[in-house]
């Protein structure tokens, strides 16, 4: 497959602060590419550089073989963008919103009419097309925003945390949408703080921290990078959990973490054998077991291993940072 | 002109609110403050008494006692006519030495008044005639046109203070409308993310800036019309007629473009709406007061005059007053007013384009 985006030695400095520090990666056409990283890692700056609204300090970005700083208009025409906030003009009707979007991307009048009609159908908003977007429900606005971002049929769609703040139902729906778009041949770049989202959707993931790429690969490659082991998970009663942890430590030298009635331990070598031995031992000691299982490390484990901090833990922090940005503006 | 279209659609969707909002300011100022001085004594009249006899003094007393005019006594006719020219008095009554005697071609009292202030004179003329009639005098109304040598109509014309005020309110409504229109909309667009969606699209930054400014100029058409309409409801006409109306729109739009430009420049650098509001007010408020919106710029102390001369609103207010009060707009004055406003406009447009050139979201 040919590369639709080639990023080489990208650097972006804001004064003394280096937000992006020598990043290089390629994105193949037709992929769903995930960019994963904690807040302040440089995800959004990287996206802004690809979108052409920030000028890189060094390095360059080729979109479909064109430098995005030299062929600005052409490159922008090829890229669609959607962020976690729903950006629609609430004073304008659905139709007007799409009309303005079509004009922003220089669609010919006939072309625009066609595109708007299809977009309204796709968003299931045809019967509400003359209602102001401000009167729409959250889901309707979100659908309008999606088709608005896609009005110029971009080859690449960049999604900046597309499902942050959505409930489970809407999140699954959004995933479905993303897959459908991808199936139509749209290359998708997505940043996310949800590890399972990256795992669920992406063909390839780059983990970014402190402006550098610290790992790139498919989700399973990243997992294997952490270890060949598996995670042991035991659910028991609150009283017995301490005792079980002690047994795991003394008999199998496993470092267990105890959360109320849940025990987790990481089995580095021969996980299958260790698992059965643990099971036997615990049964023999007649310790109460509600469930016992094992699984491959999750993306969260990968992340902790790679960056030394849990992405989950920083979610709350991200939120307040974002609010701070909103307030500052 | 995608952005222009968008701004206009948004403006249209709020049309009723916009009309009400832009009418509030003129209504409050024109109806309430415009009536300042319109008590029973609402016409300033200068009297020059050349007769200086018992009858002439009692004639002056009878004029004062009618309370329809406020009377100023002056010693020479030249002084009085100068005041009339300067618009400080509405009429000049000259009591000739022969008073109260008179003959057919030889009246005892002359009344001079400015044609640009005809309405106010009509109110007092019958009173003067009646009073003079009591002394058996008749009047020659000298219908000469005065009041045109000064290019600054002055507050002295009490009867038309409301006309004086409309000029100031008009340029102000436009200036305020722009600072809280164009610039503010850029800040909210940035907060809501709309600005980013314009920046990532292939349209140029210049067309974003120009779209905002031109939309502001179009909105100003509404503000100007509403102010003139409110003025008309209070009996304010335009002395220069249709040509004057055209001039008012030309001047108003130049003010609009200039201020839309300034507000865009501010919005390019200010992110918080609270900070923007404060800074915009700090800029616009002094410009407003210094422009002579409420009283003539000549009444400001001399050390402020250079600042007044630099205030573009001064020229706008001045130009509008020329066409509204004096009824004509001399070419030298046009060149000055339009020249200054054109420079102001260019400053607004070029400045905002330059400030947005390196702008990133």
Image: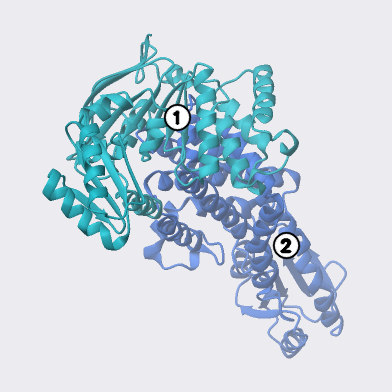
Residue B76 at x, y percent in the picture: 60, 73
Could you say which chain is coloured blue in the image? B
Q: Quadrant of residue B145?
A: bottom right
Give A181 or A109, whichever is nearer the viewer: A181
Pointer 1 chain: B
Q: Is residue A124 above or below residue B242?
A: above
Quadrant where the C terminus of chain B is found in the figure:
top left
- Identify residue for label 1: B200
What residue is shown at x 62% (from left), y 52% (from top)?
B320
Residue A290 at x, y percent in the picture: 36, 51
Q: Is residue B99 left or right of residue B286?
A: right
Mark 2 secondary-structure assignment: helix
Mark 1 secondary-structure assignment: loop
Q: Is residue B121 left or right of residue B335?
A: right
Give B142 or B86, whichever is nearer the viewer: B86
Could you say which chain is coloured cyan in the image? A
Residue A27 at x, y percent in the picture: 35, 18
Give B54 or A228, whichever is nearer the viewer: A228
- Identify residue for label 2: B117
Of the numbered discs 1 and 2, the one sitting upstream in the chain is 2
Q: Is residue B39 left or right of residue B303?
A: right
Pointer 2 chain: B
Residue farthest toward the front in the current orientation of the protein: A284
């Amino acid at each position: 497959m040919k590369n639709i985006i080639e990023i080489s030695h990208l650097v972006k400095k804001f004064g003394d602060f280096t937000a992006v520090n020598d990043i290089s990666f390629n994105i193949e056409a037709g992929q769903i590419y995930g960019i994963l990283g904690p807040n302040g890692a440089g995800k959004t700056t990287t996206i802004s550089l690809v979108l052409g609204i920030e000028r890189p300090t060094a390095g360059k970005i080729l979109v479909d073989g064109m430098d995005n700083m030299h062929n600005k208009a052409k490159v922008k025409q090829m890229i669609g963008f959607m962020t976690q906030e729903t950006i629609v003009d609430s004073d304008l009707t659905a139709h007007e919103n799409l009309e303005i979007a079509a004009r922003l991307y220089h669609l010919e009048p006939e072309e625009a009419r066609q595109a708007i009609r299809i977009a309204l159908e796709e968003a299931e908003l045809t019967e509400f097309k003359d209602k102001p977007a401000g009167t729409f429900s959250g889901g309707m606005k979100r659908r309008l925003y999606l088709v608005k971002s896609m009005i110029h049929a971009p080859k690449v769609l960049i999604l900046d945390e597309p499902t942050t703040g959505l409930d489970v139902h809407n999140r699954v729906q959004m995933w479905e949408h993303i897959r459908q778009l991808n199936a139509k041949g749209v290359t998708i770049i997505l940043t996310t703080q949800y590890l399972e989202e990256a795992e669920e959707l992406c063909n390839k993931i780059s983990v970014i921290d402190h402006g550098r790429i610290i790992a790139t690969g498919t989700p399973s490659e990243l997992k294997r990078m952490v270890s060949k082991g598996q995670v042991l998970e035991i659910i028991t009663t609150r009283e017995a959990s301490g005792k079980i942890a002690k047994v795991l430590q003394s008999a199998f030298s496993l470092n267990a973490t105890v959360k109320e009635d849940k025990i987790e331990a990481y089995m580095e070598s021969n996980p299958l054998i260790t698992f059965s031995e643990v099971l036997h031992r615990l049964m023999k000691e007649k310790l109460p077991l509600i469930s016992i299982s094992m699984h491959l490390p999750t993306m969260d484990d990968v992340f902790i291993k790679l960056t030394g901090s849990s992405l989950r833990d920083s979610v709350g922090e991200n939120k307040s940072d974002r609010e701070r940005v909103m307030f500052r503006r | 002109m995608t952005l222009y279209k968008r701004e206009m659609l948004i403006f249209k969707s709020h049309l009723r609110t916009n009309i009400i909002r832009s009418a509030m300011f003129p209504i409050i100022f024109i109806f309430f403050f415009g009536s300042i001085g319109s008590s029973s004594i609402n016409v300033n009249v200068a009297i020059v008494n050349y007769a200086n006899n018992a009858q002439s003094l009692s004639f002056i007393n009878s004029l004062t006692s009618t309370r329809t005019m406020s009377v100023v006594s002056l010693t020479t006719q030249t002084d009085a006519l100068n005041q009339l020219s300067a618009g400080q008095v509405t009429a000049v009554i000259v009591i000739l030495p022969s008073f109260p005697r008179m003959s057919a071609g030889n009246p005892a009292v002359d009344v001079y008044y400015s044609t640009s202030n005809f309405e106010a004179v009509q109110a007092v003329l019958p009173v003067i005639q009646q009073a003079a009639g009591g002394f058996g005098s008749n009047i020659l109304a000298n219908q000469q046109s005065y009041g045109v040598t000064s290019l600054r109509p002055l507050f002295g014309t009490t009867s038309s203070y409301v006309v004086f005020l409309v000029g100031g309110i008009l340029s102000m409504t436009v200036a305020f409308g722009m600072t809280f229109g164009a610039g503010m909309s850029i800040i909210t667009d940035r907060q809501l993310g709309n600005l980013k969606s314009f920046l990532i699209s292939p349209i140029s930054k210049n067309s974003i800036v120009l779209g905002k400014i031109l939309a502001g100029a179009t909105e100003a058409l509404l503000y100007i019309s509403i102010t003139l309409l409110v003025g008309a409801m209070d009996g304010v006409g335009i002395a220069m007629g249709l040509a004057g109306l055209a001039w008012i729109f030309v001047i108003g739009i130049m003010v609009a473009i200039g201020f839309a430009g300034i507000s865009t420049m501010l919005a390019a650098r200010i992110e918080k709406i609270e900070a923007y509001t404060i800074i915009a007010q700090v800029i616009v408020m002094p410009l407003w007061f210094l422009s002579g919106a409420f009283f003539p710029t000549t009444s400001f102390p001399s050390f402020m005059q250079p600042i007044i001369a630099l205030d573009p609103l001064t020229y706008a207010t001045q130009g509008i007053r020329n066409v509204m009060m004096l009824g004509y707009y001399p070419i030298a004055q046009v060149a000055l007013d339009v020249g200054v406003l054109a420079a102001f406009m260019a400053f607004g447009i070029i400045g905002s384009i330059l400030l947005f050139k390196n702008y990133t979201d």
